[in-house]
Image: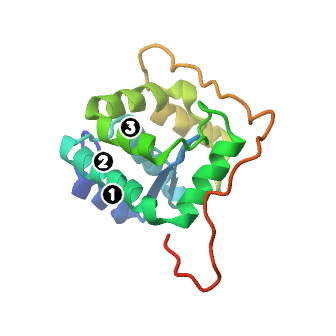
Amino acid sequence: HEGTVPHDKAAFDELLEARGFTISHSLQSEYAEASTTGLSADFETAAALFAEFLQQPRWPEEAFAVAKERVIGRLTSETDSMESTAHRAIANALFAPGHPLFAGTLDASLAAARKLTFAEVRSFHQSRCAPKSLLLAISGSIDEATARKVADAAFGGWKTEGSPPPLVFPGPREKIEEKRIVGTLKADAPRSG
């Protein structure tokens, strides 16, 4: 993360650290998740900071450029990985194009990564990280009334334009076709990946 609009990365991290909060996040091909942890006594502050993190992320274009180069580097390194080649082959055999788990070709992934723009990533985030596509789960020593009140205070004013586009995924392939072997691995051969 690069911080939020009101707080740069250092200031935001300091706010979290002062209370012992953590915020973690990950992005998968089919979903994104973010979570925060902290003491129940600080639930209101944790919820406010978590809402700020989700609703007002800082988007420095330089950080996008660095992340894009990392992705391109990771994809380029997959050319020598038997494990990555096998993973792509299995995913492509099981899932149809358009499904988030369909891997496509490495060349297509590299071309898409190279073509990706800062504006496209920002637009995607604004359309998908929105109240209508958010599931908020709260656990811990918090009673339901307090949880609802605090969540409403932190997230209730979050407004976005329109609705996110519907997610439509094709199902798994109806028939898995016989595929050729994409590589072999000898027991004593060096491995990469």
Front residue (pair 147, 82): 82
Q: Quadrant of residue 124?
A: top left
Residue 73, labelled with which disc? Answer: 1
Residue 47, labelled with which disc? Answer: none
**Between disc 2 and disc 3, whose residue precedes?**
2
Quote the CA–CA distance across marks 1 and 3. Answer: 13 Å
Q: Residue furthest left?
A: 62
Please, what is the three-letter code of the amino acid marked with disc 1? Gly
Residue at left 44%, top 59%? 79
Q: Quadrant of residue 147?
A: top right
Please, what is the three-letter code of the amino acid marked with disc 3? Ala
Q: In the rendered image, which residue does mark 2 sit on?
A: 68
- Mark whose residue sits in front, 2 or 1: 1
- The answer to whether residue 113 shows anywhere in this view is yes
Residue at left 58%, top 51%? 88
**Between disc 2 and disc 1, whose residue precedes?**
2
